[in-house]
Amino acid sequence: DAGITQSPRYKITETGRQVTLMCHQTWSHSYMFWYRQDLGHGLRLIYYSAAADITDKGEVPDGYVVSRSKTENFPLTLESATRSQTSVYFCASSPSLPRETQYFGPGTRLLVL
Amino acid sequence: SQQGEEDPQALSIQEGENATMNCSYKTSINNLQWYRQNSGRGLVHLILIRSNEREKHSGRLRVTLDTSKKSSSLLITASRAADTASYFCAMRLNAGNMLTFGGGTRLMVKP
């Protein structure tokens, strides 16, 4: 009954390195989302997925890549990390239509040096 | 740019007092939701109000929606120290299927 989990919870990396943030949900929700949270900007949608193998861009997708080969997993990859990608990243899921209630993971704090 | 703006950005009250947070938005919406975020944690859904509703209650929470003014308010009655958190409004715009979040209100309830 873990719900939605994210790993790692904390990550320090260097500019130019590739980083993958993991998200796993146990509810079999159709929709999954990645947000970043920064002071002064609230939560901004990076990418979302309506089902396995279906993904689409959100408000701030540049520099990020996602995949969804299985319903329960939705990894987010920073192909070449930049300092501006230092942020707190939240994964969320929703059982049906994306406009309804979303369930959030605990977040991953990423620091890019 | 954010579709939702919250006011105030920060609020400090004493335990037992009521806390009111406001959210304004720019375009027509399908529904508006409120979420709570405790420090260092993910967001937790509190309540959803649809565009054809004017008021909803859930325990000590009361949410109102005024679509003519494009605004919503969240009232927490008889606040407790455990209510200390950030509160976010999120709206589903009629143009699109995703949620757009406001910048949040940081609430501190002093014991």
Image (spheres, helix red, strand yellow):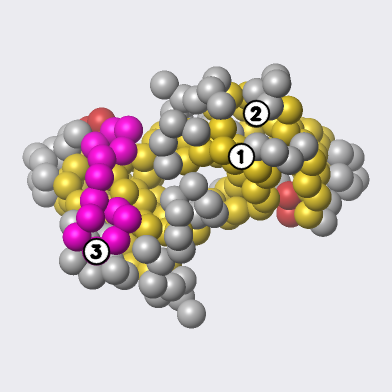
Local secondary structure at mark 3: loop
Mark 2 neighbour density, 10 Å: few (under 14) some (14–19) many (20 or more): many
Disc 2 marks which amino acid? Cys
- Quickly name the residue at label 3: A52
- Quickly name the residue at label 1: B32
Local secondary structure at mark 1: strand
Q: For the point 82% across and 56% down, which residue is it?
A: B59
Region rendered in magenta: A49-61
Residue A9, numbered label: none
Task: Assess whether mark 3 and mark 1 are in contact (beta carbons under 8 angstroms).
Answer: no
Q: Is residue B71 left or right of residue A8?
A: right
Q: Residue A101, located in which quarter of the rendered image?
A: bottom right
Disc 1 marks which amino acid? Leu
Q: CA distance from mark 2 to mark 3?
A: 34 Å
Residue A96 x, y percent position in the rendering: 45, 60
Task: Assess whether mark 2 and mark 1 are in contact (beta carbons under 8 angstroms).
Answer: yes
Q: Chain of mark 3?
A: A
Local secondary structure at mark 2: strand
